[in-house]
Amino acid sequence: MSDKFLTNSKEGQQIGPSEQRRAPLCTVRQGSASVPIYSGVVNGKIRYTIAFYHDGRRVRRMFTKLDDAKREAKIVAGNIQRGFQENNDLRPAERDAYLTAIGLLKNVAVPLVSAVEEYAECRKRLGDIPLLSAIEEFVRRMNGVTIGVTVPDAVREFLEAKAQDGMSQRYKLQLQSTLGLFAKAFPGPIMHVRSEQIDRWLRESNLAPVTRNNRLTVVRVFLNFAKQSGYLPKSEASEADSVRKVKTGDTETEIFQPADLEKLLLAAPARLIPILAIGGFTGLRAAELSRLDWSAVNLDRRMIELRAGQAKTASRRIVPISDNLAAWLQFVEREGAVIPDLDYYRQTTALAKKLGVPWPRNVLRHSFISYRVALIQDVNQVALEAGNSPAIIFKHYRELVTEEAARAWFGILPPEGWAPPQVRWNRFNRKLELSSATDIDNRNKT
């Protein structure tokens, strides 16, 4: 590096050409970069000057002490070596602040620019709230919470836990269906899911009110599991808890006529009789029937025992077996699960469709409660048998049918010498193939 430059003295005095050609007092080097230090007398005092190029121009800086000149020359040479000559423009106080900031970030491995950008954005979002106060509140809320867990990962863990708890196949399918859709709609971190997003997801699905409320219930159960697992703050309500359920309104209770159920039973193979007969003559819910084992069905004592884990209300329930139900169950092999294959429900509705019998939602249960109330005229007793509240029974099922119709319902018996027909089921096409004898019998009854 050349040492040909002018050194200003007081009031524009200049060091002459003879001084300019003097060798430097010393040179400070960093790698291939070097910065010379010159000495000279200005106003009767010795001054030390460093010289270097910046943006194509000669730059010089003067110091009263040699050590200060050497320290500055070392910094300049180091910056030149690294290609950061622009830092040479920093004043000493600015440089000290810069070095201090770099030192503070040393243990967090964050570039200075990134740290400043993040801080500036936080200040902008927080407004007048002190940043440290916001961080302390966040740490308090998130104590023990695992951050970054995604909804799909939490759903998989939830379903595995429920399977280990022995959930029914029907409940498993409901959880898989609802939470599969939920995970697809919210693939990101579970911490980022907000109540307004859940509400919008439910609304956009265009579901019936009851189905929509059922989905919300499943999501609430799932998010409460996430809280217990440490994926959400335990001390706060989940985002689904603030989403309101919709009003379902009063719905018309649709039931079978005695002739409808008799038509179905006479055309049903033995494997479908439990769904039709137990459902129609005891009012068990489909989920309860799916959990039932034949060991709980006592024909001698004429009772079905629903244990607490099998009933929807989580309380033990005794359901009486009527004479006609006992007669229909004689045609069934009573070992193991009452419904060993959930596909039997699909076969039952396919049978109704084949015979031209409409199948409203929960029609067997609604029919039993309606006819049972009309037969015994005791709402409280029917509420105990059906696992429902007397208020619901009184509101929806009272005075729907006559006592005469009720006697006909509980008088449906298999004809003498009758045997369940052979009915083939094409699982792939979901179609029933009725025997010719069954078709003829049904045509005659129609």
Image: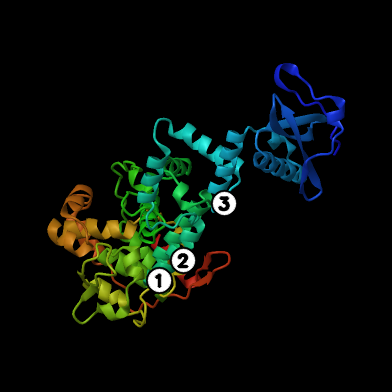
Please state the horizontal and vertical placement of residue 196, each as a whole percent of the image. Answer: 42, 40
Q: Which residue is mark 1?
A: 272
Report whether residue 267 is seen: no
Q: CA distance from mark 1 to mark 2?
A: 8 Å
Residue 40 placement: quadrant: top right
Q: CA distance from mark 1 to mark 3?
A: 73 Å
Q: Which residue is mark 3?
A: 106
10 Å neighbourhood of mark 2: few (<14), some, or many (≥20)?
Answer: many
Residue closest to the eye, 106 or 265 = 106
Secondary element at image label 2: helix
Q: CA distance from mark 3 to mark 2?
A: 69 Å
Q: Residue at x 58, y 39 (%)?
A: 96
**Badge number at residue 347:** 2
Instruction: Name the side, left or right, on which 121 lies relative to 352.
Output: right
Earlier sequence position, callout 3 versus callout 2: 3
Earlier sequence position, callout 1 versus callout 3: 3
Residue closest to the eye, 344 or 222 = 222
Q: Residue at x 72, y 45 (%)?
A: 78
**Badge number at residue 236:** none
